[in-house]
Amino acid sequence: APKFLNLTKANVQIKKINRHSIAVTTDKLVKGLYLENLYGNLSDNYFDLGAGETKIITAPHEIEIKNMKSLNDFIQPKK
């Protein structure tokens, strides 16, 4: 269960490759990363991403991320 994970704030970076694709990377494990595009559906908009991993997201239309959330934003690290 996510509540047993030691999730911390991650630095998620989004790099635009072109109008129809982006690269998403992070420095720490991100669980349940949700991306919301201003112009419609993405090839993947809810996924986990490991530290140092890159995921390429595509769309048949322009990509402009208007919202991004993950479980890391809501679960406080264990003390």
Image (cartoon, grey):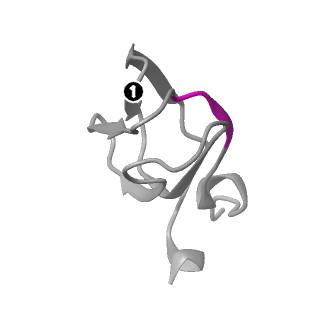
Q: Residues within 10 Å of mark 1 (few under 14, many from 20)?
A: some
Give the image quarter of residue 26.
top left
Which residue is the site of mark 1?
Answer: 20
Q: Nearer the viewer, residue 36 or 11?
A: 36
Q: Nearer the viewer, residue 38 or 57?
A: 38
**Lateral position of residue 45 relative to residue 18, left or right:** right
* Residue drawn where x is 62% and y is 37% of the image: 39
**Lateral position of residue 71 relative to residue 1, left or right:** right
Is 66 placed above or below 3 here?
A: above
Residue 70 is situated, as x and y percent measured from the top left of the image, at 60, 54
Residue 38 is situated, as x and y percent measured from the top left of the image, at 67, 37
Is 16 placed above or below 41 here?
A: above
- The residue at the far front in this view is 60
* Residue drawn where x is 51% and y is 50% of the image: 41
- The residue at the far bottom in this view is 1
Give the image quarter of residue 22.
top left
Residue 30 is situated, as x and y percent measured from the top left of the image, at 47, 51
Q: Is residue 47 magenta?
A: no
